Image (cartoon, helix red, strand yellow):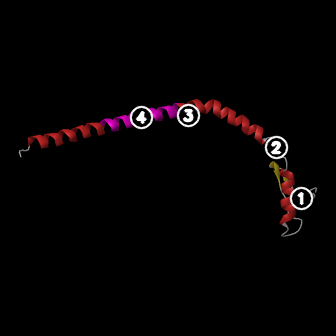
Amino acid sequence: MKEPDMPGKTMAHMATARLFRQNQRGDWTDVVNRVRDALQGYGSGLSSILTGARRTAIQTELPEYQANVEGALRTHEANVQSLMNQYQARWNMFLRQGTTRTTSRTV
């Protein structure tokens, strides 16, 4: 369906903007159909654009992301090792205190 010619259909200060007006007051069905028809095929090249953007993002951002992940893993492993060392030291202290108490008591 071809959109009827109406005054104000395009605007000089917005050359690429299009207006879609009701043919009859309250009749949005025709407006929606004309907008749908105008947009049909608009996104057909979008998938290739997104594929290119994805490829570019992977090439530029992936090395930094991997470096950040590796750094976070090293930090995490160091923190876990530190906590394990603290736990082991406290466990050994507990065992020494327990041994000292039992050997210093007289029966």
Q: Earlier in the sequence, mark 4 or mark 2?
A: 2
Considering only order in the chain, which callout, 2 or 3, is on the residue closer to the N terminus? 2
Amino acid found under the numbered disc labelled 2: Ser
- The N terminus - image quarter: bottom right
Residue 8 shows in the view = no
Query: In the image shown, does 4 or 84 lie closer to the viewer?
Result: 84
The crowd level at tag 1 (other Cα within 10 Å; few <14, some 14-19, many 20+) is few
Between circles 3 and 4, the one closer to the viewer is 4
Residue 85 at x, y = what percent? 31, 35
Tell which tag, 3 or 1, sits nearer the viewer: 3
| Left or right for 30, reference 62 | right
Residue 44's tag is: 2
User: Which residue bears the numbered disc 1?
Assistant: 7
| Residue behind mark 4 | 77
Q: Is residue 76 left or right of residue 30?
A: left
* Residue 91: quadrant of the picture: top left
